[in-house]
Amino acid sequence: MMRVVAGTLLMILLAGCSTKLTPLRSYTLQTPEVSSIYKDGYQNKTIKVMQPQSLKEVMSRRMHFSYSPTEQGTYLNSKWSNDLGKLVQGILIDTLQSSGMFKGVVSYASTAKADYRLESTVYDFSHHVRGNASYAIVSIQFTLVSTHTGNLIKSRRFSYREATKSTDAEGYVEATNRAVESLSSDLLLWLK
C-alpha cells in the first residue's frame, strides 16, 4: 500500500513539474506589402531566385543571438517556422511577384529557364544584445546574374539594424520583420 501511495505522489509531482516547461514557440517572417508600380524594365523577363547562402553559420530553424562579436548562442524555446534560407527565399519570391516587375518569378528548384538569376549571401541575420541596447541585424548581399551569358549584372549588400522593444525572441522577430520590410523595398528600387 505504501508503494502505491509513494508511486502516486511521485507521478503527481512529475506531472506538476512537466507543466511548468516553457513551450516551444515558432516564428515566421511576414511578407511585406508591395505595390505593383514597377511595371517597366523587366516586364518580358523571368528571374530565378536562388536559395540564400550563409558565410557564418548553417541556415536552419535556430534563432541566433549574441552578446559580443565573439559570443553567440541560440534561443532554446524559440525557432523559425522553417529553415531561415527558405523563409528569406520565400519573402524574395513573394516580393518580386507582387511588384509586377518581372513576367515570371520562380524558385531555384524550378526546371523553367529564366533570363536572370538572383543570388544572395547572408552575412548576418541575428539578435544583437549589447548592454542595454538590443537590435535585430539583417545583412544580405544580392547578385543579379544573366543566365544567358553568366555575366554579373550588378551586386549590392544591404544591411539593417532595427532596435527591439524587448530582449527576447518576440522582440527580435518584430524588429526583424521591420528590417525585412525595408530590405524588400530597397531591393526593388535597386533592381529597377
Image (cartoon, rainbow, N blue to C red):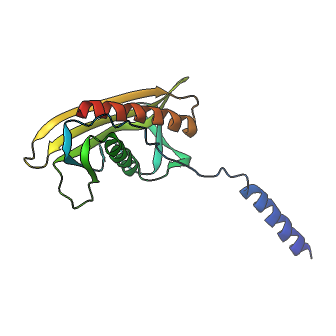
> Residue 85's spot in the image, x, y percent?
36, 49
Q: Is residue 9 visible?
A: yes
Relative placement, left or right, of 155 versus 77 is left
**Residue 177, image x and y in percent?**
47, 36
Q: How many marks?
A: 0
Which residue is found at the position 26% from the left and 55% from the top? 108
For residue 17, above or below residue 97: below
Quarter the C terminus occupies: top left
Which residue shows up at 42% across the image and 32% down it?
Answer: 179
Q: Of 16 and 87, which appears nearest the observer?
A: 87
Q: Residue furthest top?
A: 132
- Farthest bottom residue in view: 1
Q: Residue at x 27, y 42 (%)?
A: 120
> Quadrant of the image for the N terminus?
bottom right
Q: Position of residue 142 (x, y in %)?
A: 25, 38
Of 59 and 174, nearer the camera is: 174
Left or right of 84, for residue 78: right
